[in-house]
C-alpha cells in the first residue's frame, strides 16, 4: 500500500538511535508510561512493547503499561468531557495522573492508513486534556509536559523505501510536533519497522534487539 510520496529516509548514520539529542538531565530511575494499541496479541507491536518493558524493568525503571484493546479503553471523547472545567470519569483521571507522573512515554502502534489506530487517537483525545497536557494563556498555548521524553514505535507493511512512513513522515510529524511538541515534549524519537509482512524471523529478532537497545540508551 503506497499512501505517501517517497520521502528521504533521514536517519543520522552517526547516531542511528538519536542519543545525541536526548535530554542530558534524564533521571536515573524513570517512570515510563508504555501505551500499546493493537488488537492482535501475536502481532509485532506486542513484541516491541514486551521487549521495551523488559529492558526498562531490568534497568530499574518503573513501568506503567496499558494495552488499550485488552483493557477495552473507551476511545470516544464525550461532549461532557471537552471543557477544561469538566470532570472526566475515574479511568480517565487515572490515565491523566499517569501522563503527568511519567518521565518517558513509549507509544507502540501499527500504521493504519498512514495514521494511528482510532483507539489510540481516542486515548490522546481523552487523556491529553486542557489543564493536564497543555493550556492556553493570554500569550498562547503552553505545553505542560515540559522536560518529559517520548519514543514512538510504529509498524507497517509497505516497504520503507516505498511508503514514506519512516523518518520525517507526516505521521512522525503528527506525533513529534502536533501532539508531543504542542504539549512541551521536545525530546522525541520515532522508529518505524517495515515491512512486517515481508520480514523474516531473523529480521524480526534483530528489530527486537534494536528496540531493547533504544530502550536501554534513551
Ligand atoms: C486497517 C489497516 C490499515 C493499514 N494501513 C497501512 C498503511 O497505510 N501502510 C502500511 O504500510 N501498512 C498498513 N497496514 C498494515 C499494518 O500496518 C500491518 O499489518 C502492521 O503494521 C503489521 O505489524 P503487526 O504485526 O504489529 O500487526 C494496514 C493494516 C490495517 C488492518
Image (cartoon, helix red, strand yellow):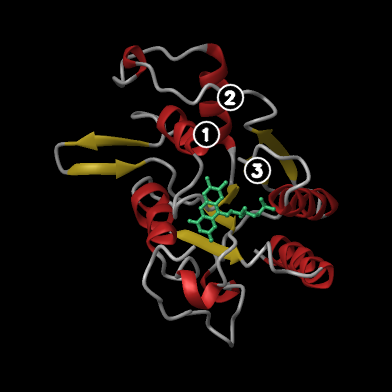
Q: Which of marks 2 and 3 is nearer the N terminus?
A: 3
| CA distance separating discs 1 and 3 | 15 Å
Which numbered mark, 1 or 3, is in the foreground of this view? 1
Q: Where is residue 210 in the image (x, y as percent from the top left)?
A: 73, 69
| CA distance separating discs 2 and 3 | 14 Å
* Residue shown at the point (79%, 71%) measured from the top left: 206
| CA distance separating discs 2 and 1 | 8 Å
Left or right of 82? Residue 6 is: right
Q: Where is residue 54 in the image (x, y as percent from the top left)?
A: 82, 51
Q: Mark 3 highlights which residue?
A: 34
Q: What element carries label 1?
A: helix
Q: Which of marks 2 and 1 is nearer the N terminus?
A: 2
Which numbered mark, 2 or 3, is in the foreground of this view? 2
Left or right of 59? Residue 109 is: left
Q: Residues within 10 Å of mark 3 (few under 14, many from 20)?
A: many
Q: Mark 2 highlights which residue?
A: 73
Q: Earlier in the sequence, mark 1 or mark 3?
A: 3
* Residue shown at the point (48%, 79%) measured from the top left: 9
Left or right of 75? Residue 177 is: left
Q: What element carries label 3?
A: strand
Numbered label tally: 3
Q: Mark 1 highlights which residue?
A: 119
* Residue shown at the point (58%, 65%) measured from the top left: 191
* Residue shown at the point (56%, 55%) measured from the top left: 152
Amino acid at each position: 500500500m503506497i499512501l505517501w510520496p517517497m520521502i528521504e529516509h533521514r536517519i543520522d548514520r552517526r547516531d542511528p538511535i538519536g542519543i545525541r539529542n536526548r535530554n542530558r538531565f534524564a533521571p536515573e530511575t524513570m517512570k515510563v508510561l508504555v501505551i500499546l494499541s493493537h488488537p492482535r496479541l501475536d502481532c509485532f507491536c506486542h513484541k516491541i512493547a514486551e521487549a521495551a518493558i523488559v529492558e526498562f524493568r531490568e534497568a530499574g525503571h518503573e513501568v506503567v503499561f496499558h494495552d488499550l484493546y485488552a483493557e477495552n479503553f473507551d476511545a470516544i471523547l464525550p461532549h461532557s468531557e471537552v471543557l477544561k472545567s469538566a470532570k472526566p470519569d475515574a479511568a480517565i483521571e487515572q490515565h491523566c495522573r499517569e501522563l503527568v507522573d511519567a518521565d518517558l512515554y513509549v507509544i507502540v502502534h501499527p500504521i493504519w492508513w498512514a495514521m494511528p489506530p482510532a483507539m489510540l487517537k481516542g486515548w490522546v483525545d481523552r487523556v491529553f486534556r486542557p489543564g493536564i497536557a497543555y493550556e492556553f494563556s493570554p500569550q498562547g498555548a503552553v505545553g505542560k509536559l515540559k522536560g518529559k521524553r517520548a519514543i514512538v514505535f510504529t509498524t507497517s507493511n509497505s516497504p520503507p523505501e516505498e511508503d514514506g512512513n519512516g523518518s520525517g513522515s507526516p505521521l512522525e510529524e503528527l506525533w513529534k510536533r502536533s501532539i508531543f511538541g504542542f504539549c512541551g515534549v521536545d525530546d522525541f524519537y520515532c522508529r518505524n519497522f517495515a515491512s512486517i509482512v515481508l520480514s523474516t524471523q531473523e529480521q524480526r529478532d534483530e528489530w527486537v534487539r534494536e528496540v531493547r537497545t533504544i530502550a536501554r540508551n534513551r
